[in-house]
Every structure is written in C-alpha cells, then in structure tokens.
Image (cartoon, helix red, strand yellow):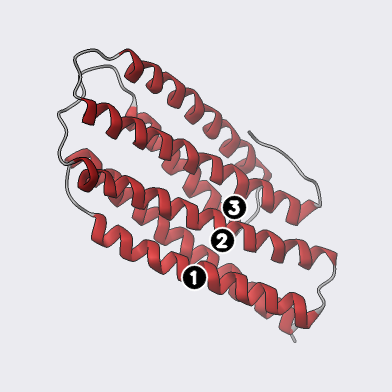
Amino acid sequence: MARPLDQGITRIKSLIIKMGRLTEDSLKLALEGFAKKEDVNVQVKAWSNTILILSEEVEDRATELIALQQPMAGDLRTLKAYIKIAYDIERYSRYALDISDILNRLEEWPPFKGELKLDEMAEKTLATVEISIRLIEAMDEKLVFELSKLEAETDELYYGNLAVLAKAKKTDHRTIIAYTLTIRYLERIADHASYIAESLTYAATGRRITLR
C-alpha cells in the first residue's frame, strides 16, 4: 500500500507537469502573436493566472506534506525542489505574458531589417522548456546536459541579437524596444529551464550543480 507521502508527492508532480504543458502552450501562442503582430494577451493572461494558482497549490500541498508526514532526506529534497520548480514554471508563464503584452504597450512596430536570429532563439528556448518538462516526468542525466547545451546556445544568440540591435541605424525605436524585450524574456526563460534541471538533479542525487 502506497504511503500517504508517496501519494502526495505523485499528486504534486502531476500538478507541476500540468503547469509545464500549459506554459508551453502559453509561450508558443505569445511568440506566434509577436511574429504576426496579433493580440493574444487575453488568452495568455488567462493561462498565466491559472498557472499562478497551480503554483500556489503546489506550494501549499508540499508544505503540508513536510509539516504532517515528516519526510526523510530524499523525499524532503524532492518536495523542496517541487516548490522551487513550480516558481520557475510560473516565471515561464509571466515572461510569456510579457511578450504577449508588448503589442499593447507599443502598438504595432515596423519590421526589423537586419540579420536578427529571433526565430532560432525562440526555437531553442522552447526546446529548453520542453526538455525541462520531460525531466520532471522522468529524470535523465543525458537530458540535463542537452538542456545545458541549449541554454548556452540561447545565451550566445541573445548577446548576438543584442549586438545587432545596438548597431541598428534608422530603425524605429518601437522596433528596437520590442525585439530587445523579447530576446531578454527568452534568455530568462532558458535560465529558468536550467534552474529546473539543477533542482531535479539535487532532488535525485543530493548533488548541487550549476549549468549556467
């Protein structure tokens, strides 16, 4: 018969995976809206609010298990990791919301004429998010290093894109602001994917690693 602690941890894991899948959809929609200059803010905001509620539920459930079930070291690490991971996923959704809100804040901006690698950066960032959710489902050390590699590549694209934007001449200021904000949000999302991999590694092994 499964321990109440095990059942509780399984329920929390399911909540976190649900959050992760929803935030993937949220980020994809936000990026699609940015590319097409379509207002998707209402839907992204609704999803973001749902993710926030789920994040608070994860924290409440984990705290209750810690208080009532007296978990041993391994289970305690897992519960602490899940609280932190719920926060990281909630940050995914908030950055997606920020991207979706750029159109409302700046109104429509002229296209950028230059060698900006936004699509490549977006693709790699989405991949880090997808891998982080797969890691929650089933810890795999190979995926940890794959995620680390993608996060490093995302950083390189961020600084490369930033340099292109900094050198842009005769470009509408709204265009510069829109793209600068978006690449910054993508870079931060990839960072939080690394934080998730670090937390899961610590929960599984007791070892603290830094992927950035």
Under circle 3, the secondary element is helix
Label 3: how many Cα within 10 Å (few below 14, some 14–19, many 20+): many
Q: Where residue 41 appears, x then y in whole percent?
A: 25, 55
Marks 3/1 in contact by CB < 8 Å: the verdict is no
Asked if 104 appears above or below 84 in the picture, the reply is above
Q: Is residue 2 visible?
A: no
Where does residue 204 sit, x and y in percent of width and height? 75, 55
The residues bearing labels 1 and 2 have C-alpha atoms spaced at a distance of: 8 Å
**What label sits on residue 54 in the rendered view?**
1
Identity of the residue drawn at 55% across and 40% down: 191
As displayed, is residue 169 above or below residue 89? above
Q: Are marks 3 and 2 in contact (CB under 8 Å)?
A: no
From the viewer's side, name the closer residue of 201 and 101.
Answer: 101
Q: Nearer the viewer, mark 3 or mark 2?
A: 2
Judged from the image, the secondary structure of the residue bearing numbered disc 2 is: helix
Q: Position of residue 177 (x, y in %)?
A: 29, 31
Q: Position of residue 61 (x, y in %)?
A: 63, 77
Residue beneath the point at 24% across and 12% down: 169
Establish if 24 lies above or below 51. Answer: above
Residue 135 is marked as 3
Residue 141 seen in this snapshot:
yes
Q: Amino acid at mark 3?
A: Leu
The quadrant the N terminus occupies is: bottom right
Apparent side of residue 86 relative to residue 200 in the rendered image (left or right): left
| 160 lies left or right of 71 | left
Q: Residue furthest bottom?
A: 1
Q: Which mark sits nearer the N-terminus, 3 or 1?
A: 1
